Image (spheres, rainbow, N blue to C red):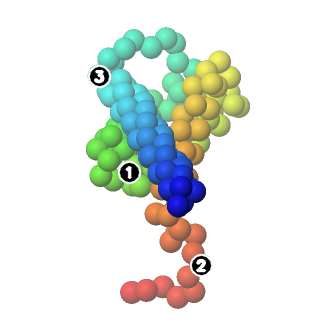
Amino acid sequence: MNAIRAASTAIDWRARTGTAVLHAARILVGAFYLFAGLNYFFELVALGNSHEFLELMIPGGYFAFVKALQVAGGIMLLSNRFVVAGLVLLTPVTVNIVIFLITIYQAQIADGVVVLILNLVLLWGYRDAFREIFRPQRTPKF
C-alpha cells in the first residue's frame, strides 16, 4: 500500500513540476515576444545599432508585420487562452531568429537559443494539439 502511495506521489510531483515548467516557459516566451514587438512600435527601450540585414527589412513593412505577429503571439501565450495558436505564429519567428543569429549575427546567439529551448518545451508540452497536423489524410473533408 505504501509503494502505491509513493508511486502516486511521485507521479503527482512530476505532473506539477511539468505544469510549472510549462507555465514558466509560456510566460517567459510570451513576455519576450510581446515586449520585442511593442518595443519596435513604441521604442520602450533604446536598442543599439541594428544589423544591415534588418535595415533592409524595415522600409518594405516586412519587419512591422513580423513584429505585429510577435505582439499577437505574445498576447496569446500570456492570456493562456490560445496557446497553440500563439505557438503556430511564434515558432517560425523563433526559428528565423535563430537562423539569423547562427548565420549572420553571432553576437547574441545565446538569447536566441534560450528562446528556442523554451519554445521547444512549449511545443512538447502541447504536442497533443499538433498530432492532427501530422496525421496523413487521403481525401479532403468538405
Residue type marked 2: Pro
Q: Position of residue 79 (x, y in %)?
A: 28, 44
Q: Secondary structure at mark 1?
A: helix
Q: Secondary structure at mark 2?
A: loop
Q: Disc 2 vs disc 3: Cβ atoms closer than 8 Å? A: no
Q: Is residue 41 above or below residue 91?
A: above
- Residue at 62%, 32% in the rendered image: 113
Disc 1: CA contacts within 10 A as few (<14), some (14-19) or many (>=20): many
Question: Do we see residue 15 in this rendering?
Answer: no
The image quarter containing residue 32 is top left
In the visual, does 99 lie left or right of 72? right
- Sequence-wise, the earlier of marks 1 and 3 is 3
Q: Residue furthest right?
A: 103
Residue type marked 1: Val
Which residue is disc 1 drawn over? 83
- Measure the C-alpha gap from mark 1 to mark 2: 24 Å
Which residue is disc 3 drawn over? 42
Q: Position of residue 22 (x, y in %)?
A: 46, 44
| Depth check, front residue: 77 or 48 | 77
Q: Is residue 65 above or below residue 50?
A: below
- Residue at 64%, 25% in the rendered image: 109
Which residue is disc 2 drawn over? 136
| Depth check, front residue: 48 or 108 | 108
